[in-house]
Image (tube, rainbow, N blue to C red):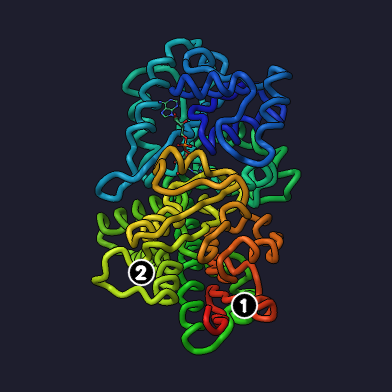
Amino acid sequence: MHVLVIGSGYVGLVAAACFAEAGHRVLGVDVDEAKVATLSRGESPIFEPGLDDLLAKHLTSGALRFTTDLKVGIAAAEAAFICVGTPQSEDGSADMQYVLAVAGQIGEAMALRAKDAKPLVVVDKSTVPVGTAARVHAEIAAHTDRAFEVVSNPEFLREGCAISDFLEPDRVVVGCRSDHAETIMKALYRPFLDRSGGKWFRMDPASAELTKYAANAMLALRISFINEIANLAEDVGADVDHVKLAIGADHRIGPAFLNPGPGFGGSCFPKDLQALLKAGREHGHPLMTLATTVEANRMQKQVLLRKVKAHFGVKSGVPAPLKGRRFALWGLAFKANTDDIRESMALELIDGLVNLGADVVVHDFAAMEAVKGKIGDRVRYAETPLAACEGADALLIATEWAQYREADLEAVAGALKARRIFDGRNLFRPEAMEAKGWTYHSLGRRAVEVQGS
Ligand SMILES: NC(=O)c1ccc[n+]([C@@H]2O[C@H](COP(=O)([O-])OP(=O)(O)OC[C@H]3O[C@@H](n4cnc5c(N)ncnc54)[C@H](O)[C@@H]3O)[C@@H](O)[C@H]2O)c1
């Protein structure tokens, strides 16, 4: 099958590479000329495990090509996926300008299709508000009388394991009105579902659009819930590790998304929650659980800074109270295995520390360039995790890279001024840290304070 994938970001690139892997002829499109040039050389502009290999394989085989001009592939295409960004507008709603611009471009290019060609299946894969399939349909129809149908096919991949999520989905959601569209979509996804045993859900486009927002809202709600339980656990002398395992063993609850952390970030949850809140308000159904989830997350993003301030006795009204202190910060990406720093909690932590006068030395395995581009020399950048710790008063951990969990803590202790860690990802157990003489603050477990530290 011939497939157009418009937008070559995290979602579009992964979709393009995976459809090529399934044996389709794929043309990836992006307006960013530099990105298309990079991709055409076989280099990936983003960090996503496994993506480089798939790109190289299918650029070589010829199954995958990139262009800035969607007209190149429109005549032969059976499906055209819209995978462009839907960032947050000032009023919280999803900014639809990129999706609608692509719809207009598809409409204009439709004249290149044969009059008797089968209807082009235009697929909204971007995360979009309910009613977008109809808007995209109207935008395309304004330019053409050639046959097409707009389908909603929300994407559930997770950055960091996007390739395996795409190749082995739990489920595929398709909002469509015709059997022709369902047949095309099934042909595209059948190899993946056969491999994973995942479920196929056909529904109307509005339900498919709402499913994506509801899924993200539910996951965010679980994160904020366990974060609040963790905060309470610290105050009442409980251990959140025991609590999460025991509640997760209840099959009605399940164990996923019950790890406390420094607040959720990334390119999806924050903006998607705002868009859903806005939709609720507009329809006279304010989503109260969601509003509280967002507020709890806003406060949670301060959790490490609160602990640092309490430990170092920072008082309000004192100018630059952390002047002369140096902090090593491990982790900049909003989660492990990605270079994505959109809404990353680490950036807020850096802001807080620097505003209090501290010197911050950072390390990340993939996101250093992105942070340099955003905040430049506000912090210093270390080549290795150990180098970041050199002469620092404490180590702060914001991202759960596996390599940090496996770090040689004795070497870290040798580099730091004191054995002191503030761990936003609960990488270590408090008892083990106490036995080795560390001052160790984590989330939802007792703090270990070494006298005089
Ligand atoms: N990143 C994720 O983990 C994830 C997961 C599920 C769903 N989504 C959703 O998928 C959509 C895309 O997200 P992303 O993270 O891949 O975005 P992104 O910002 O990484 O990529 C978007 C790409 O679209 C390109 N683009 C913009 N206008 C274009 C046009 N007219 N023609 C061609 N290309 C154009 C941009 O240059 C960019 O490369 C969003 O709606 C997002 O909410 C993202």
Secondary structure at numbered mark 2: helix
* Residue 309 percent coordinates (x, y): 39, 72
* Residue 247 percent coordinates (x, y): 60, 79
Q: Residue 241 — which label?
A: 1
Q: Residues within 10 Å of mark 1 (few under 14, many from 20)?
A: some
Q: Amino acid at mark 1?
A: Asp
Q: Residues within 10 Å of mark 2 (few under 14, many from 20)?
A: some
In the foreground, 369 or 379: 379
Residue at image coords 43%, 37%: 373
Q: Cβ of disc 2 within 8 Å of ligand 1?
A: no
Q: Is residue 183 visible?
A: yes
Residue at image coords 69%, 77%: 436
Q: Is residue 8 above or below residue 275?
A: above
Q: Is residue 213 visible?
A: no
Residue at image coords 48%, 60%: 327
Q: Amino acid at mark 2?
A: Thr
Q: Residue 292 — which label?
A: 2
Secondary structure at numbered mark 1: helix
Tell me whether the residue at label 1 lies in contact with that at label 2, contact meaning CB atoms closer than 8 angstroms: no
Q: Is residue 115 above or below residue 267?
A: above
Q: Cβ of disc 1 within 8 Å of ligand 1?
A: no
Q: Is residue 357 above or below residue 451?
A: above
* Residue 217 percent coordinates (x, y): 45, 60
Per the model, the C-alpha gap separating discs 1 and 2 is: 24 Å
Give the farthest residue toward the bottom: 236
* Residue 97 percent coordinates (x, y): 32, 33
